[in-house]
Image (cartoon, rainbow, N blue to C red):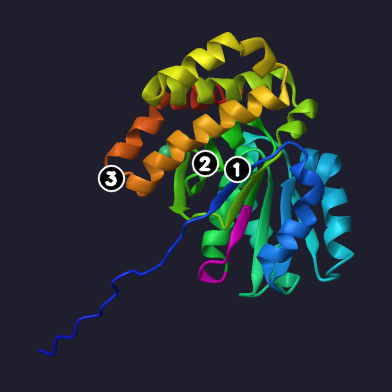
Amino acid sequence: MSLLSVHLRSTRDDSYKIVIEPGSLAGLPKRLLSLAEGKRIAVVTDRMVEKLYGKRLLRALASHDSRTRLFSFPSGERAKTRRTKERLEDALLSSGYGRDSLLVALGGGVVGDLVGFLAATLHRGVPFVQVPTTLLAMADSSVGGKTGVDTPAGKNLIGAFWQPLEVVMDPLLLSTLPRRQITAGAAEIAKHGVIADKALFHFVEKNLERLLAGDPQVVSRALLASCKIKAGVVSKDEREGGLRQILNFGHTIAHALELARGYQLLHG
Ligand code: GLY
């Protein structure tokens, strides 16, 4: 018998910044071009966000780098599937995207999770930037590197841990978000308060109307406190060996209800 060891002690530093800034969408093209360092950018989004922000972002990026393309897929949880991922993969590959790609996940939680998973597997892993456009995605799914798709057996059952290069949140984007969607995000913020920060919970209680109205100041403060909690947990237990399970508070029953109702209920 011959016996060899493959030494793989990891020295990666996957640390990244979360930018929370009302109006940051205006500076996003510049920010992305600087993060890309010459890589070819692909903006991936859903059809709704494509119309609202995607086309404008593509125009701004393409005026600096004509190789930039936008790829979109149908909006909604039902599109968060292996099939959608496969279609996007084929589209990216046939457009010549190689190892020097940088993906931009522009959208809500479905877009962030799916594009993150796509980034984790495209050419065995390319970087991606999260640009969440819903309060739910800003408060929770865009941070922490959980990526994946749903299957008929349940939500997020296929995926990977793949951290973004950066997360850029613009609370002003909530002005186009239906109140029902903002309420779903507020629930995740309140959840972070319940599990780790009494002051955050009281802040949400006291400022609920302004939060639900998308007041940029209140949203920014709530997001900062919320993301601090999530970042703190993820830094200690990225792969959910134990502590990270606390972020799933309430999710066991909620995921089952979402599935049972055919994803008519919002996650929050
Ligand atoms: N949404 C729970 C987590 O990211 O762990």
Q: Position of residue 1 (x, y in %)?
A: 9, 89
Q: Residue at x 87, y 57 (%)?
A: 60
Circle 3: residue type: Gly
Disc 1 secondary structure class: loop
Q: Residue under label 2, please give it.
A: 150
Q: Residue under label 1, please give it.
A: 80
For the C terminus, give its image quadrant: top right
Q: Residue at x 80, y 65 (%)?
A: 68
Give the mark nearest the N terminus, 1 or 2: 1
Q: Looking at the image, do the residues carrying marks 3 and 1 touch, with CB atoms under 8 Å apart?
A: no
Say above or below: 154 vs 131: above
Circle 1: residue type: Lys
Res. 265 visible in picture: no
Circle 3 packing at 10 Å, graded few (<14), some (14-19), many (20+), is few
Disc 2 secondary structure class: strand
Give the mark nearest the N terminus, 3 or 1: 1
**Label drawn at residue 241:** 3
Res. 236 visible in picture: yes
Circle 1 packing at 10 Å, graded few (<14), some (14-19), many (20+), is many
Q: Looking at the image, do the residues carrying marks 1 and 2 touch, with CB atoms under 8 Å apart?
A: yes
Quarter holding residue 118: bottom right
Give the mark nearest the N terminus, 3 or 2: 2
